[in-house]
């Protein structure tokens, strides 16, 4: 890999500056890539990609493209954000056009803006291609609307990850009466449920946990706020996972009930047809 990179750099005019394209790859399903994102990936010669870029999307990377993994997972950082910024700048300044592929949308808890600002300050052109963020894609695949008439007129996205100390206005969140979607909250389920209930949110508020959303491995578990940590432990939920809190989760429960009724009706019709045939 290192020799390939050296060849790439040495074969590029030193006085040319490459372009960095920040691509939001969506939450996992390659069919959710935008046309523009897919085109950028298919034309890429050098791809720098994240941990949350699914295997199905990585399978679309051109065979001839050089790739560099810089994913960050809790407790297993392969590169710091500063190091990633420097990598992108290094190759662009050497004349290489870099396609930076990020899970979801790079501007929603993806640090895409940090990379854009860093590169722009160095005189490097940056193109940004938005992607479907997990809060939209994963909830939709789980039959959970972010808003629903009579249940929620708005939604709020927060991240439970912080470089130092998590600073959240729990009182405001508990009183919003909106859908609350929490990214990277798996390790803080005790804190999330305790703080929201302590600041006035009902312990019976519906919740959902979506694991590996928008992939073939997606799992969805529902319950109530007081059971949040129990749901995680009982089902051994692993990252990446999204937490949804609010009355809109009841729509998914209704959908499950309706689907079960439909399946029973179809089974009854099939049985009746066999008896009369």
Image (spheres, rainbow, N blue to C red):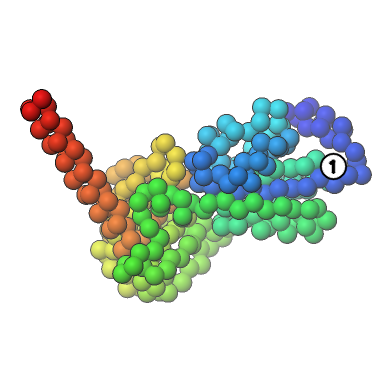
Q: What is the crowding at mark 1: few (fewer than 14 residues within 10 Å), some, or many (at least 20)?
A: some
Residue 73 in sight here: no
Please state the total of marks drawn on the protein image: 1
Residue 16 horizontal/vertical position (percent):
88, 44
Residue 16 in sight here: yes
Please, which residue is most extreme toward the front here? Answer: 277
Q: Is residue 109 above or below residue 63?
A: below
**Residue at 31% across, 69% down:** 150
Q: Quadrant of the N terminus?
A: top right
Q: Secondary structure at mark 1?
A: loop
| Residue linked to disc 1 | 94
Residue 121 horizontal/vertical position (percent):
80, 59
Residue 234 horizontal/vertical position (percent):
29, 44
Query: Front-most of 116 and 76?
Result: 116
Query: Front-most of 120 and 64?
Result: 64
Query: Front-most of 268 and 101?
Result: 268
Left/right placement of residue 178 relative to residue 159 reads: left
Residue 206 horizontal/vertical position (percent):
29, 60
**Residue at 73% across, 59% down:** 117
**Residue at 41% across, 37% down:** 217
Q: Quadrant of residue 73?
A: top right
**Residue at 34% across, 46% down:** 220
Left/right placement of residue 106 relative to residue 214 reads: right
Please, which residue is most extreme toward the right here? Answer: 15
Q: Quadrant of the C terminus?
A: top left
Please, which residue is most extreme toward the top here? Answer: 277
């Amino acid at each position: 890999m290192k020799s390939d990179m050296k060849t790439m750099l040495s074969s590029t005019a030193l006085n040319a500056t490459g372009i960095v394209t920040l691509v939001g790859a969506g939450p996992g399903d390659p069919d959710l890539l935008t046309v523009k994102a897919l085109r950028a990936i298919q034309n890429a010669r050098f791809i720098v990609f994240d941990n949350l870029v699914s295997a199905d999307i990585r399978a679309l990377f051109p065979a001839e493209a050089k790739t560099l993994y810089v994913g960050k997972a809790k407790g297993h950082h392969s590169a710091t954000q500063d190091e990633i910024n420097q990598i992108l700048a290094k190759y662009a300044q050497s004349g290489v056009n870099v396609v930076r592929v990020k899970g979801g949308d790079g501007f929603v808890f993806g640090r895409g803006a940090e990379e854009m600002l860093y590169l722009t300050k160095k005189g490097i052109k940056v193109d940004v291609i938005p992607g479907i963020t997990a809060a939209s894609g994963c909830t939709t695949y789980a039959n959970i609307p972010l808003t629903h008439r009579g249940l929620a007129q708005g939604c709020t996205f927060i991240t439970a990850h912080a470089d130092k100390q998590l600073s959240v206005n729990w009182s405001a969140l508990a009183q919003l009466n909106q859908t609350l979607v929490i990214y990277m909250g798996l390790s803080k389920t005790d804190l999330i449920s305790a703080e929201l209930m302590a600041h006035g949110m009902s312990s019976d508020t519906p919740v959902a946990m979506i694991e590996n959303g928008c992939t073939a491995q997606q799992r969805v578990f529902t319950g109530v706020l007081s059971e949040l940590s129990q749901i995680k432990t009982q089902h051994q939920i692993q990252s990446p996972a999204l937490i949804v809190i609010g009355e809109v989760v009841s729509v998914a429960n209704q959908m499950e009930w309706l689907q079960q009724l439909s399946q029973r009706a179809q089974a009854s019709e099939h049985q009746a047809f066999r008896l009369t045939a």
